[in-house]
């Protein structure tokens, strides 16, 4: 018997980084999904196979005799990060089912590049918890899955995670997150276009960099607070379906994130290419340092402009995913 669950990735309309400090953020789920297939085992070992996640593919197997650490021939930060999320997700499933010695075969397929700012780790954690608990005979409410997936990211990211990515992936649609307060939001059809520069990043390192800057300079702390004020302004525009104002606020948000040092030359170039292509607004999405930008575009000019940009490895339109985690 096997069980498969999927969960969507996300883009940030507003608020990344500031959400770590209790400011509000509005992430939106997009129809790019991670699928996790789980089969129970008769022993306590774990075997994980991943054909995607922006890697060449890998398979690892481990168990109690190896102290829970996978033996990987060529260790890389991406593989270590991916394994961290998977192992913590399985630990949450064991806890939910009260099966501490359960073993699993896990297969991961993903349409979401790892480390690109589209919520790959959150989607894998959410789908992994849902599939593994179902495989053990337990069905969790999406909010329970979101809470457990947050615990996964909190552990792997050394306590610097927010609830935004995991709540958005579990619930779908547009959501508002402020500290521990998470709620779904009504949203119009949002014409997202995503541009990807092919790079990946270490989320924990980027979050730590903002923390250091904020601790050193009062104006950096003020910049984080300004992002929170921008989000509150954007909530009304979202409720009104005012795409023009949403775009202007996205542009402003990108400037503030750049001031905090989390943009990059390639992301800035993609943002400007999107704006030159007619975007209502464009900004980096996620931790930054490379990865993805998101733009609002009601036509096809932005996708064309991004595809012609030397920094762009991939560009695609992305529908708002109205459904979060689900069994496949």
Image (cartoon, grey):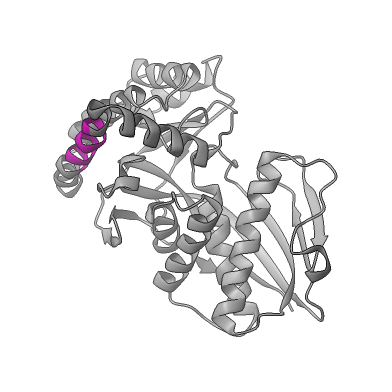
Question: As rendered, which of 70 and 290 lies closer to the eye?
Answer: 70
Q: Residue at x 38, y 16 (%)?
A: 272
Which residue occupies the foreground of this view, 67 or 179? Answer: 67
Q: Is residue 297 visible?
A: no
At a point 56% along the width and 71% down the height, the residue shown is 92
Q: Which residues are magenta?
A: 222-231
Residue 115 in the image: state x and y as whole percent: 57, 39
> Where is residue 188 drawn, in percent x and y?
26, 49
- Among the 4 quarters of the image, the one containing residue 56: top right
The residue at the far front in this view is 216
Q: Which image quarter is the N terminus in? A: bottom right
**178 versus 132 height, above or below:** above
> In the image, is 129 to the left or to the right of 278?
right
Q: Is residue 315 above or below residue 95?
A: above
Q: Position of residue 274 (x, y in %)?
A: 39, 21
Residue depicted at 69% across the width and 69% down the height: 38
Check residue 130 for magenta coloring.
no
């Amino acid at each position: 018997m096997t069980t498969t669950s999927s969960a969507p990735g996300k883009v940030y309309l507003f608020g990344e980084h500031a959400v770590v400090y209790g400011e509000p953020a509005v992430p939106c789920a997009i129809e790019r999904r991670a699928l996790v297939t789980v089969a129970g085992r008769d022993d306590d070992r774990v075997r994980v196979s991943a054909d995607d996640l922006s890697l060449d593919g890998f398979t690892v197997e481990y168990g109690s005799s190896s102290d829970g650490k996978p033996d990987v021939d060529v260790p890389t930060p991406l593989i270590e990060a991916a394994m961290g999320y998977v192992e913590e997700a399985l630990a949450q499933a064991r806890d939910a089912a009260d099966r501490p010695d359960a073993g699993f075969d896990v297969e991961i397929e993903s349409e979401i590049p790892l480390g690109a700012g589209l919520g790959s780790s959150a989607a894998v954690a959410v789908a992994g918890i849902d599939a593994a608990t179902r495989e053990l005979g337990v069905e969790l409410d999406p909010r329970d899955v979101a809470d457990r997936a947050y615990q996964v990211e909190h552990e792997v990211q050394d306590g610097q995670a927010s609830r935004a990515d995991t709540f958005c992936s579990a619930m779908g649609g547009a959501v508002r997150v402020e500290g521990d307060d998470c709620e779904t939001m009504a949203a119009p059809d949002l014409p997202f276009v995503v541009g990807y520069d092919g790079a990946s990043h270490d989320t924990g390192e980027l979050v730590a960099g903002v923390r250091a800057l904020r601790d050193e300079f009062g104006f950096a702390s003020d910049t984080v607070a300004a992002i929170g004020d921008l989000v509150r302004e954007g909530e009304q525009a979202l409720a009104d379906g005012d795409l023009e104002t949403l775009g202007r606020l996205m542009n402003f948000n990108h400037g503030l994130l750049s001031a905090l040092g989390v943009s990059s030359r390639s992301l800035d170039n993609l943002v400007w290419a999107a704006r030159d292509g007619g975007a209502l607004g464009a900004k980096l999405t996620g931790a930054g340092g490379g990865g993805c930008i998101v733009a609002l575009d009601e036509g096809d000019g932005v996708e064309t402009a991004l595809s012609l940009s030397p920094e762009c490895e991939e560009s695609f339109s992305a529908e708002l995913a109205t459904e979060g985690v689900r069994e496949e």
